[in-house]
Amino acid sequence: MPTHFHLMVYVNKTKIDNRKEDLNSSIGKMLSSYTRSIQKQQKITGSIFQNHTKAKCLNQIESLSPNYWQTEFGTQINIEQDGHNYPLICFNYIHMNPVADCMVHSHEDWEFSSYRDYFNGRNGKLIDYDRAKEELGEIFISLNNF
């Protein structure tokens, strides 16, 4: 997306030298490094991002409810009993975002999406098909129909 991006990452639980590093600070470091690189390349200073980074743990229901989002079928709400579907909902949202913002007609048309890596045979290096299938469930197999 021209103005923002979405990442869906699986974080392995590891402990490194008694130092706790959460996902927000790790992403912050990545964005800071990216910013410095762009600033150097473009010979500019200042922020290149408009808003602060947000991160949510998708498999801890208590940190998610309630969440609202728009779909082609109207406003949806995540409530506790549906919380186990939230990672799948986010996965779909990420891949449908360019269509919802009228950037492309179909989700497979957005060249910066991982959709083609998951469903159209493009061999990207950033996805883990088996991990996605494991985390999102068996319904993941039929997602290319969404």
Image: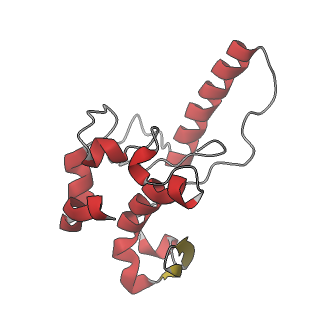
Query: Relative to residue 77, is residue 35 depicted above or below?
Result: above
What is the image's colouring? secondary structure
Query: Relative to residue 55, is residue 42 depicted above or below?
Result: above
Expressed as whole percent of the image width and height from the top left, the position of residue 3 reads 67, 44
The residue that appears at 23% across and 49% down in the rendered structure is 131
Expressed as whole percent of the image width and height from the top left, the position of residue 93 reads 46, 62
Residue 59 visible to the viewer: no
Q: Left or right of 55: which side holds 120?
A: left
What is the quadrant of residue 116 in the picture? top left
Expressed as whole percent of the image width and height from the top left, the position of residue 54 reads 60, 54
Q: Left or right of 32: which side holds 140?
A: left
Query: Relative to residue 124, is residue 3 depicted above or below?
Result: below
Expressed as whole percent of the image width and height from the top left, the position of residue 18 reads 43, 40
Between 16 and 42, which is closer to the camera in this rendering? 42
Between 57 and 8, which is closer to the camera in this rendering? 8
The residue that appears at 35% across and 49% down in the rendered structure is 10
Q: Left or right of 86: which side holds 68?
A: right
Between 20 and 128, which is closer to the camera in this rendering? 128
Residue 126 visible to the viewer: yes
Query: Relative to residue 56, is residue 29 depicted above or below?
Result: above
The residue that appears at 45% across and 60% down in the rendered structure is 57
The residue that appears at 26% across and 33% down in the rendered structure is 123
Position of the C terminus by quadrant: bottom left
**What is the number of callouts on the image?**
0
Position of the N terminus by quadrant: top right
